Amino acid sequence: MRKPAAIHWVATFLWLAAGIAFAVGVSLQFPGTVLDRMWRLNPPAYATFHPAARLAGGALFALSLAVGATAGGFSRCRPWAWWAAAAIFATSAAGDLCSLAAGGGLFRTISGAAISTAFLLLLFRRDVRDSIGSERR
């Protein structure tokens, strides 16, 4: 059985998210590197993370590991990874909606929730669900 393209898209997005979480974690754990430049893209996030940089950096390393494991498992059509990916995207969408309710930026929160919801819709496609658990190695 050939894997649907949606599996590749979801896994790729999860790998990218894991890489970003890792880079942000490195930046927080080891300030003064070239990675500090990325904070220019989102100064409010820096203001939020900086006071607890060590703790936040460690949490982002853990998040990176969990999301990376989910990406690897999902690309191999493991059932546990489908559930983990669904939890990741549902949590992200819920967080964006809570941020909107708390007065977060309209475009950022709506677009984040829309992207997470789009990935949830990909997860629930019949061809994706039928592929989960089909690969044995």
Image: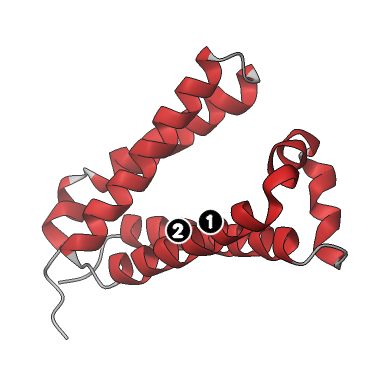
As drawn, the label of residue 59 is 1
State left or right for residue 59 relative to residue 104: left
Camera-side residue: 5 or 20?
20
Q: Amino acid at mark 2?
A: Leu
Three-letter code, disc 1 = Ala
Query: At which x and y percent is residue 124?
Result: 21, 43
In primary-sequence order, the first of circles 1 and 2 is: 2
Give the residue number, with chain letter if any, for mark 2: 14
- Residue visible at 11% across and 57% down in the picture: 130
Which secondary structure lies at badge 2? Answer: helix
Q: Secondary structure at mark 1?
A: helix
> What is the quadrant of the C terminus in the image?
bottom left
Q: Residues within 10 Å of mark 2 (few under 14, many from 20)?
A: many
Tell me how many marks there are.
Answer: 2
Location of the N terminus (image quadrant): bottom left
Q: Name the residue at 38% across, 65% down.
A: 71
Q: Nearer the viewer, residue 6 or 31?
A: 31
Asked which quadrant contains residue 91, the reply is: top left
In this view, the mark in front (1 or 2): 1
Q: Is residue 95 above or below residue 131?
A: above
- The numbered dot on residue 96 is none
Side (left or right) of 26 relative to 90: right
| Residue ID at (27%, 60%) | 4
Left or right relative to 30: residue 135: left
Q: Residue at x 55, y 15 (%)?
A: 102
Say if mark 1 contacts mark 2, CB within 8 Å.
no
**Badge 1: how crowded within 10 Å, few (<14), some, or many (20+)?**
some
- Residue 110 in picture, x, y percent from top left: 53, 23
Looking at the image, is 45 positioned above or below residue 36? above
Disc 1 to disc 2, C-alpha distance: 17 Å
Q: Position of residue 132 (x, y in %)?
A: 16, 62
